[in-house]
Every structure is written in C-alpha cells, then in structure tokens.
C-alpha cells in the first residue's frame, strides 16, 4: 500500500503530517511523493482562515472527482471544527482528528480495505519523541504543547486543539538532542502559543529554551509564536534565555489591533501599553532583535479611529515582519455573531495597511545593507542559489554554499521580505 500526505497551514500542522508519515512508515506503509502513485490520500487540513477553508474544501472535492478509485482520509483542524461540512463534501472519506495521530496506521489500513473510519476527539497523548518522517533533515520541528489558554473571539483553531497540554522539558530536550545528532541545524519550538508552555505542568518556557540551547552542536533554536498575555508571566526570564547565542534573535508577538477597545472586544487579555512594554524590553535587552506581528484588519467593532491606532502602533514599533489578515467570520467563533464591516471599508483599510507594511519592513531591512552577517544556510532557493537565515531570522539569498553550514556574508540589497548577499572575504 502507498500513501500520499499533503499538509496545509502552520508549522504545528506540518509537524502533525510528519508524525502521521512516521507512524505509517513504522507500520510498513510506503509514503510516496505524488497523488498519482498513491492508493490512499491524506489531506491534513487547516481551517484558521476562510481562504484556507475554501482551498482545502476545493482540494477534497477535486481529489474525489479526479481520483474516484483512490481512498481519501481527512485530517487536521477541519475534522474537529466543521464535521458537518466535511461530511457533506466527503461522505465517503475517513477522518483522523489532530489528537488521534497514533491511530494513523489502523485508520489507513481499514480505509484501504473499504471501511469509513472516523476518529476524533481530544486526548493527552504526547507528540514528543514519536516517529516522524520529513524530507528536510536540517530543520526539525518540535511541538512543545498543544492547545491554549486563550479565549479570542475570532479564533476557531482553539476548538480543534483544545485545552493546554504541555509536554515535559526532558522529553523535548531528548528529541532535540537526537535531531541534532542526526544532522539538524535548526530546532523549531512550536505551539499554538509557546508562551503558555508549562502553565499546566509547572514548567517554564524560559527553562525549556535554555535546556535546548545548551545542547552540544552547532545549531540555532527558533521560538514560535507567543501570546502577549502569557509572556507577561515570564518576560524577563524569556529575554534572558533568548540572549543565548544559539537562539535566533526573533520574536513572533501577535498584537492583532492597535486599539485597546478592539483588543477588549477580541478578548485578547492584554493592553497596548503592556504590548509596548514587552516590545521595548526585548529591543533594549537584545539589540537587533526581529519582531514579527499579526494584524487583523476590519474586526467587526473596528472604527476608523481604531484602525488609525493600529497604523500608529506599527509605525512606532517598526516590525521586521507583518502578517496581515482581513477579518472573516469563522465557524463557532464568538465574533461570528457580529455584523461585518462593509466590504469596501475592509478593502480600503487592507490596501492602506499593506502599503504601510511594505514600507516599514523594507526600511528595516535596508538598514542592514553593507553589514556583515553570520548566516545559517537552511534550504535551496526555488530560483537557484540558497536561502540562509541571519541571527535575527531574516531570509538571505546567497550563491553557491553548502547546506547546513554557517557562513559570513555581506548584505548587498534589501526588499520588504528578504535580503541579498555575497560571500564576505575577511
């Protein structure tokens, strides 16, 4: 039997796909690189935004039309968030919920034999130290916890991932150690909210970062998204941990809006002044740190004045990376009961913020032109050359170098999303 797996969405979901593949491989089931080769197709869905929902829905329908004789299994967040729609578009598809990955082999075998198996619901099964199969030996993803403490009104992902479930530091450290011994040069610590790590188990994110960073080897650690509300509990120790030379000087800190009124409506649990304080502390203590932020444009209660506050905040904190999303109702989300703002207003605000975003991020990157950077080469470029990461996790295009190595480069050009460079000769 041959299985093809395609995963959508976040780093966490990508790791779920790797776990499914690893479990199947241990069960002597072949993983193949194309739909055409496969007997069974697994679509590991994301459901965080409406465009992604539409994309995976279309994909599931198209696979059934184009390959009527192949068996299809749906995994990922859609299984838990919208089973009614999934049952409607794929009545003959099996399901594997994001908490049921350990049953992957039996679900695949039963589906291949013509059964429709649907496993969903929450569990406390750990996703650390389990089999994983990846086509990238240099970057290793470790899920440090699943679920969150949040109550954000716009979010449906929390219905799929459930309450917080942190995994032991000792287990995470052991997986990282084995990955580094097997050639990984970048360890990605990921979660729905890494700042919530340990709040259910008594451990701390700052201790986890230090334990992993202090392992032997030449590698970097990337810490995933942190909710501002939860980072407040451990901010000084997290900053101290992130000063370690093996940790990327990079923080992903979503703010979503520059208005305290909108933040309260979103039930984010933090204020703009608190957010400013966190950003200020990181920038003062770790010079050159790259800040990534998320912004939702057009939340139903966002007025013109609220939007202006968001623009003002971005111009003040000058992030290195800005993720913009237009607000859209999501199934089960509290805010879906509110009336959306007019489409033309949403479009106008989004366009304006996109222009501001490009200017801010390009200006930030242009300041690096002429500087010498120590970069880690992590992947081949899609148009030739290689992609490396600076100590601040900014992508750098470079010529002919060796994957998995550290090299010194001189920055020659900058765009809003990446840098260009040449090898630096001392």
Image (cartoon, grey):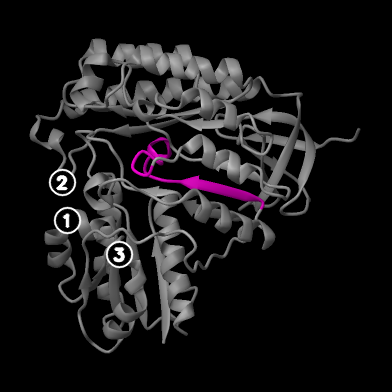
**Which residue is at 27% across, 89% downward?**
113
Mark 3 crowd level (few <14, some 14–19, many ≥20, 10 Å Cα): many
Say above or below: 104 vs 187. Answer: below
Q: Nearer the viewer, residue 63 or 78?
A: 78
Q: Quadrant of the C terminus?
A: top right
Q: Residue furthest bottom?
A: 113
Task: Please tell me which of labels 3 and 1 falls first in the chain.
Answer: 3
Which contiguous range is marked in magenta?
A: 185-201
Residue 219 placed where, x, y %?
68, 47
Callout 1 secondary element? loop
Q: Earlier in the sequence, mark 2 or mark 3?
A: 3
Q: Which mark is residue 82?
A: 1
Q: Are marks 1 and 2 in contact (CB under 8 Å)?
A: yes
Q: Which circle's residue, 1 or 2, is located before the other in the chain?
A: 1
Q: Is residue 301 left or right of residue 318?
A: left
Q: Residue drawn 25% across and 74% down?
A: 65
Q: What is the spatial separation of the Cα atoms under label 1 and label 2, in whole angstroms? A: 7 Å
Q: Which numbered tag is attached to residue 75? A: 3
Q: Indicate the secondary structure of the residue bearing disc 3.
A: strand
Picture quadrant of residue 307: top left
Observer-nearest of 348 and 53: 53
Residue 389's spot in the image, x, y percent?
65, 40
Q: Residue furthest right?
A: 426
Relative image position of residue 416 (x, y in whole percent): 55, 29
Of all residues shown, which one is farthest toward the front? 202
Instruction: Check disc 2 and report its element: helix, strand or loop.
Output: loop
**Would you name the residue on which mark 2 appears?**
331
Q: Residue at x 25, y 10 (%)?
A: 305
10 Å neighbourhood of mark 2: few (<14), some, or many (≥20)? some
- 87 shown above or below 403: below
């Amino acid at each position: 039997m041959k299985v093809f797996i395609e995963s959508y969405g976040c780093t966490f979901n990508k790791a779920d796909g790797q776990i499914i593949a690893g479990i199947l491989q241990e069960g002597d089931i072949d993983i193949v690189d194309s739909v055409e080769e496969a007997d069974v197709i697994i679509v590991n869905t994301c459901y965080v935004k409406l465009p992604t929902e539409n994309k995976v829905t279309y994909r599931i329908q198209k696979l059934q039309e184009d390959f009527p004789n192949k068996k299809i299994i749906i995994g990922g967040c859609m299984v838990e968030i919208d089973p009614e729609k999934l049952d409607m578009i794929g009545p003959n598809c099996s399901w594997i919920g994001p908490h049921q990955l350990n049953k992957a082999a039996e679900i695949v075998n039963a589906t291949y034999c013509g059964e429709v198996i649907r496993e969903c619901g929450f569990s406390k099964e750990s996703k650390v130290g389990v089999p994983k199969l990846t086509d990238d030996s240099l970057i290793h993803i470790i899920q440090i916890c699943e679920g969150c403490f949040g109550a954000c009104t716009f979010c449906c992902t929390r219905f799929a991932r459930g309450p917080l479930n942190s995994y032991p530091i000792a287990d995470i450290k052991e997986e990282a150690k084995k990955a580094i011994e097997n050639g990984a040069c970048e360890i990605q610590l990921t979660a729905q909210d890494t700042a919530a790590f340990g709040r259910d188990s008594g451990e701390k994110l700052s201790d986890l970062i230090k334990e992993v960073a202090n392992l032997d080897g030449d590698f970097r650690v990337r810490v995933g998204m942190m909710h501002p509300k939860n980072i407040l509990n451990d901010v000084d120790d997290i900053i101290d941990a992130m000063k370690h030379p093996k940790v990327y000087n990079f923080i992903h800190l979503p703010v979503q809006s520059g208005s305290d009124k909108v933040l309260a409506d979103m039930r984010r649990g933090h204020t703009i002044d608190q957010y400013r304080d966190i950003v200020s502390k990181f920038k003062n203590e770790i010079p050159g740190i790259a800040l990534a932020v998320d912004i939702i444009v057009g939340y139903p209660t966002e007025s013109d004045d609220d939007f202006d506050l968001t623009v003002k905040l971005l111009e003040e904190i000058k992030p290195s990376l800005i993720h913009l999303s237009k607000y859209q109702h999501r199934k089960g989300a509290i805010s879906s009961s509110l009336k959306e703002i007019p489409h033309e207003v949403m479009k106008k605000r989004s366009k304006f913020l996109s222009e501001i975003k490009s200017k801010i991020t390009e200006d930030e990157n242009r300041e690096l032109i002429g500087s010498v950077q120590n970069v880690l080469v992590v992947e081949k470029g899609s148009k030739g050359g290689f992609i490396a990461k600076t100590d601040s996790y900014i992508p750098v295009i470079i010529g002919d170098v060796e994957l998995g190595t550290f090299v010194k480069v001189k920055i020659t050009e900058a765009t809003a999303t990446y840098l260009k460079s040449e090898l630096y000769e001392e």
